[in-house]
Image: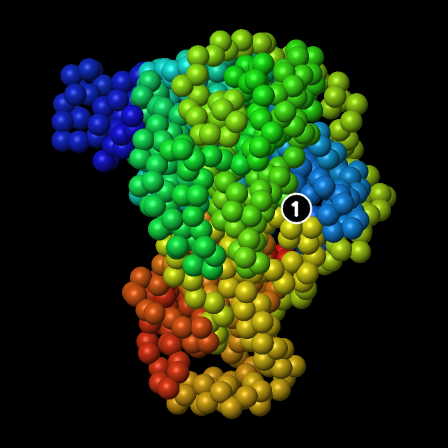
Amino acid sequence: MIKLYEGGAYLLNGTELVADNADSAAVLSKKGINVSKEDAAKNTMAYGILEKHNTSGNMEQLKIKFDKMTSHDITFVGIIQTARASGLTEFPVPYVLTNCHNSLCAVGGTINEDDHMFGLSCAKKYGGVYVPPHQAVIHQYAREMLAECGAMILGSDSHTRYGALGTMAIGEGGGELAKQLLKRTYDVAKPGVVAIYLDGEVTKGVGPQDVALAIIGATFDCGYVKNKVMEFVGPGVDKLSADFRIGIDVMTTETTCLSSIWKTDEKIKEWYDIHYRPDAYKEMNPGAVAYYDGVVYVNLSEIKPMIAMPFHPSNVYTIDELNANLMDILEDVEKKALVSLDGKVDFTLKDKVRNGKLYVEQGIIAGCAGGGYENIVDAADILKGKYIGADEFTLSVYPASTPIYMELAKNGRLADLIGTGAIVKTAFCGPCFGAGDTPANNAFSIRHSTRNFPNREGSKIQNGQISSVALMDARSIAATAVNKGYLTSATDLDVQYTSPKYFFDKTIYENRVYDGVGKADKDVEIKFGPNIKDWPEMISLTDNLLLKMASVINDPVTTTDELIPSGETSSFRSNPLGLAEFTLSRKDPEYVGRAKAIQAVERVRESGECMCSTSDEMKNIMDIIKEKFPEVKGKNTGYGSTIFAVKPGDGSAREQAASCQKVLGGWANIAKEYATKRYRSNLINWGMLPFVMDEDYAFDIDDYVFVPGIVNAIKNKDDVIKAYVVNKGMKEISLTLGALTDDERDIILAGCLINYYKEN
């Protein structure tokens, strides 16, 4: 089904793969091909797009300027506030502000709608685009109105992926978007490029989520495409519709790749024509001889309906495999859940087995992954004339945009769905991050959405509540609904798919979306609600650092949902201090109290008083340090909190996973590795040191870590930084910071991105 090449490979004429091994030179020579690996690597589509957008003149160290940007309503307030504090006068590129996350304006009083009005006023003042709530989810609007072949788009959401439409898109934390707003660059080392070679043709009933989950399952654990660009090629691409490609593409985020790009053809041209943007299309293919750093070979003909069991998109099985080995797999899921849930709640899915079949209480087809037109019409075909039943099972469908909703109404599929007992709702990302359709306690939900991390569906472990999500394709969700909640593969049903043509109604956006690109009005006053607060002052890095361990997380992977929860916290994303109260609340509820206590001592130091006066413990620690480093004193040694996590930062791009730690006095993370580039970048942009520690050390909460000469180490670009765990003595440890650009070093030294821009 899926094969990972052990090394790189050459792709000839877009179809033939030649593995890079001892025989490859002879094979190429026999075909009359004489090209170096370095030159062939320049023939990937990814290289061409990156070269076009790179401003550094050095393709090994890129400085990218994006063509367009997009954000939603739990990220754009913080981004614009950061840029305003740093001198923003006008949006330099088209910047779209969608309102698809905090769309439920009843949550948290007026504060969600206050954020929307902030966005509209900023679109007017700075020259942006404002998409009102329920009109479209962020990524569907970007596909319909922003994407264009050969372009690059930066978004403040991790699922910013428009590669199927020929656009290289990257999801990052807000700091990276603020840089673009201030006409700075996105700095990254040249990424590797991995070919995703699609062969064969999918069978009837198999959908894009099935293909995506199979790829995620094959690549996530081994990190095969981590921080690389996935380039989709091969004859199998030609046999997939545009919507199908989009459905695979959006899920590439869950592999931890940097971005994605696909070859384009007449089907993509037709997609742009349907959306009244023919000029955005151009044919894109790799060169005649292209070299890739790796290959994921996918035989589409062998892909079967898949399910990603709790609590990660990589925990994949075929639905047939699950049904055939039900109790064994559920036992394995429970064992894995002990790690994810820390044993805080009793978790089982075995009680969902009824007469040998797995029963689920909820089905959801929604958002940027599931809410596409073809997913919904295929689901409607499966369900037509059926009824979902009157038991616990419910089904909700969220079209990804109002134009899709409108077409479903016009062609009758909306009526077909409603007639089954399903509920069809407006464009909203809520089910994906815990702000809509939260299941009952102990319930099991199957969803065509993007993630199934713990609590993403809205339950709260700290309150004893637990429900869980499995990811599936819309077609198998509909098949399960036909059987009134009993897990069913779409290929088990004989369905005649009607595939009605899609007609895009452009007047919906023309009449409702505010487009201020090129029309900035500096006289417009920004509307601030009472929950919208400025970032607190942050000091520059001190010569030395004394860190106190405020949390220790030994899980194999820590998600951004665990670092700062989604769902009900979203209403506070515009209030840095208010949001910080939720930091690590679902993983380590005592963290905030510990961090605040550490910060209180730092405030004493900043006031000019001696830290030693705050406690006997602090006096003892400083005395131990001064025995080896007598020059250490309060004026040159900052004091702050840190956390240790094995592999933090999987999942969302939300910068608040880092900024909330900083707001509470955090100065660093210590990790074995970082799950994603975007989380590491978020740490840096908030002036936090992204330490990596290769050696094994069992940190305890309240351990002290002293880092002498940290400013000089950063300025001198030291590869290894000596630090000391301080208790009754001093245990030397070695830390590294990895590759840092000069700008990133300056940002850390300044204390955060805002300070850096103030200084420049």
Judging from the image, what secondary structure is the residue with disc 1 in? loop
Q: Which x, y percent locates residue 111? A: 76, 50
Is there any visible trace of residue 652 in the rendered image? no
Specify the quadrant of the image occupied by residue 388: top right
Mark 1: few/some/many CA within 10 Å (<14, 14-19, 20+): many
Q: Nearer the viewer, residue 235 or 399?
A: 399
Count up the numbered dots: 1
Residue under pointer 1: 74
Specify the quadrant of the image occupied by residue 488: top left
- Considering the image in quadrants, where does the N terminus appear? top left
Left/right placement of residue 538 relative to residue 128 reads left
Three-letter amino acid code at the position of disc 1: Ile
Which residue is located at x 56 percent, y 48 percent? Answer: 441
- Considering the image in quadrants, where does the C terminus appear? bottom right
Which residue is located at x 13 percent, y 31 percent? Answer: 22
Q: Is residue 282 above or below residue 675?
A: above
Which residue is located at x 65 percent, y 35 percent? Answer: 428
Q: Which x, y percent locates residue 743? A: 51, 54
Is there any visible trace of residue 387 in the rendered image? yes
Q: Nearer the viewer, residue 699 or 745?
A: 699
Q: Is residue 516 above or below residue 302?
A: below
- What colour scheme does the image use? rainbow
Q: Nearer the viewer, residue 301 or 458?
A: 458
Looking at the image, the residue that sits furthest to the front is 355
Which residue is located at x 38 percent, y 48 percent? Answer: 334
Q: Which x, y percent locates residue 751? A: 57, 64
Q: Which x, y percent locates residue 372? A: 57, 24
